[in-house]
Structures are given as structure tokens and as C-alpha cells.
Image (cartoon, rainbow, N blue to C red):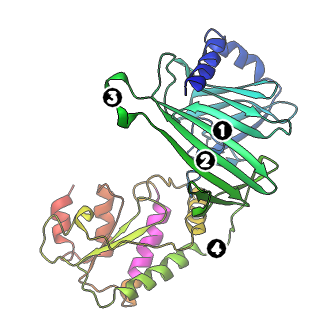
Amino acid sequence: MEIIKQELYDVYVKYKDFNFMNYYEISKKNTNNKYSKGFGFIAGLYAPSYVDEMRCGNATIGKEIKNIDKGYDYKYYFDENDRIILSEKYLSGKCYYINFYFYVNNVLEFIHYEVDGGIYSLSKSYYDDNDRICRHIQIGIFDKYNPIDNTIYNEHLFKYEDNITYIALITHYNPPQWLIGEKSKKTGIINMKIVDNILYHLDDNLNVKSFYPIRFKIVNGQKVNVPLPKRVPIFKIIKENLIKILDKWRNIYKSVIWINCESLDLEIQYTTLKEDNEAKWNIAFYDANEEKIFDDLNHPQVLEDLLFNNGCNTDDLINESDYFVNKMIKIIRELRKEGHITDDTAVILSNLEISENTLNIAKKINKKETIKGFAEKFGM
């Protein structure tokens, strides 16, 4: 870890007195531009290392857009060789951060710069003679660089064999002095490999422990996006999978069915409690009977793309995704009409945080007397 700290400190010293804004104004002229919208890490679609994106699983870091009339979250600048040299990160329409990509032989020095505050974060990437990333070092992904000390340092190591990319994610923990003890001194290692667009997690003997699809594959060391099928009838799949789960629960009395929309997996749980108390109307008290509505890991990705294209915020499906909510209301009403959900079973469609919108949705899909206790507890 001490070597990594020194390497990053050297980058900091090199650029701490650099005139970033002057360089920015000069460099952004006569460049090719691209734009993206949606959630992203500090560098949007063009992070120096793709490991953080890869570990998001089904979550997207945004999508490139051509029509910028409705705004964008990132703007990217490319030189005549189509190599990224700058990017801007916007919040509420204002540029708050600028990313600088400095290429020195086979090394990329990356600076995440806060417009009103100077250097915020930094990293360093090393490339082999075939222009493939082979090593990357950074502080914690959302941490601010501290030239004196940081508590987490990440190192990404890459090895390429035919069509397989092996990756070791090494986390070096550097706790504050007052926390130092035998248990706090540790290094975490996660071994992975990518084959096509499948990410495999490996154990210490490099045997596969688990796997899931990601949005890209690695071809000769370069990230190549894998498009998802566009004609998947995603809400038809949601309804069909709900019916399968409800059929398994057919002989169980369910006073409340809770569809948890905290993530795009969409989990469903139930309680058999009859008495109107906190345990009945609080998912935290439910037994561990949850089921994922999606059994195919590609489907949350397809749902996310669909919602993105309909202007929905996938970080808050209940309060900021009217398209999703209206589709789900329609499905639940159909399930009631078809007899899969009885009238005396309350259905709550919610994130883990109950909001006014949660109650409004509940009123649309339940009889008033069925959710009387819920309305009394969470009435806004």
C-alpha cells in the first residue's frame, strides 16, 4: 500500500499547481464531442478503469445520447485520434466537475477536478505494449483525495489470456490512527474473470463462485458494449413471474403483499399478520420469504433501458418513474380481476422509504378498508 500511496502522491504533486482552467479552455477547442445522460461515477461512461462499472452488476452508468435538447449529465471531448482528453460532469444543468486525462507514454494520469474547489480525486492507469490496461490505482471511488492520508486504496490488476480477462481487485485498508488494531489491518482481494459479457467471481483457487451478465465484453483489452434486446416484453414478463410466485403462495393466507421496488430485481414478500400493528405494515418485520420477480438476470437490465428511454429515474422507481408506476398499477389491477390476488389482501408497491406517493399508489390498487391501518400509520 505504501507504494500506491507514493504513486498517487506523486501525481498530486505533479498537478497541484497546474492551471487546469486555462488548459481546459485551450484543450476543448477543435475537439469531437459526445454526451451521456444518467447515473455515473466521477467520469461517466469513460472511467479510466471499467472495474467499478463492472461491479455495479445490472446497474447502468448511463447512456450516450444524440439529442441534447433535453439536457445531459456528461459532455466528453476527444482529440483527432478519438482519444478522450476531457469530460464535464453536470449537476442540475451546471458543470461542477471537469475530468482531465493526461497521457504519458503507457500511463494515464487522471484528475477529477472540482470547478470551485480544485483537485477532488485522482488515479493512475498503466498500459501494456498492446495498449491494454494492466494496472490501475485509485483511492475509494467516491472519496476525496487527501495528500496526507486516505483510508482506502484500490488496485486493479489485469491479465489477458485468449478470450478471457482475469482481474484482481485489491483493496488496501488504511484506517485512521485511532482505529488501528490487529483486526483493522487487512487487505481484501476479489478475483474475477470476464468471458464474453459474463462476469465470474472466483474463489482463492480460481474456481467459479457466482456469475452474472454485464453490459460489455473485453476484446483485446478494450471495452466493447453489448446491446441488449430491445423487443423484450418486460411488463408481460413481470406479470407472468408474479403469477408464478402467487401460485406458489396460493394456499397461504396473505394479509399484505409487499412489492419492493428498491432495486430493479423487484422483490415480493408477504405477511400473514391480521392485526393492524407496525409489524403488519412494516416490511422490516416480515419473515424471510422474499422472491425476486426476475429470474433471468438480463431482465433488470432491459427494464432499466426501457425506463431510461421513457425518462424515468431508476434510482427512485416509486417517486420519479411514473411510467413504471402506471404499468405496475395496471398489472396489479389485472391480477386482482383474474383472481390471483384477493380483495382482502393489501398490496403495497413501494421503495423501502414510505412516501406520500406510496400511499397514493396503495389507494389506487386496494379497497379503502383493506389499507385502513396503512393509511392511518403513514397518512401524510
List x then y, in percent, for residue 217.
Answer: 73, 55
Report if residue 306 is visible in the image.
Answer: no
Q: Is residue 363 magenta?
A: no
Can residue 380 be seen here? The reply is yes
Q: Which mark is residue 232?
A: 4
Q: Which mark is residue 47?
A: 1
User: Of discs 2 and 3, which sits in the foreground?
Assistant: 3
The segment highlighted magenta reads: 321-334
* Residue on which disc 3 sits: 179
Q: Residue 159: x, y in percent?
A: 73, 46
Mark with earlier residue (4, 1)? 1
The local secondary structure at tag 1 comes to: loop
Q: Residue at x 58, y 57 (%)?
A: 201
Circle 2 residue: 53
Spatial CA distance of label 3 from label 4 is 50 Å
Q: Quadrant of residue 88?
A: top right
- For badge 2, the amino acid type reads Glu
User: Which of pointers 3 and 4 indicates the residue nearer the eye?
Assistant: 3
Q: CA distance from mark 2 to mark 3?
A: 30 Å
Q: Please tell me which residue is depicted at 33% across the width and 28% down the height of the picture.
A: 179
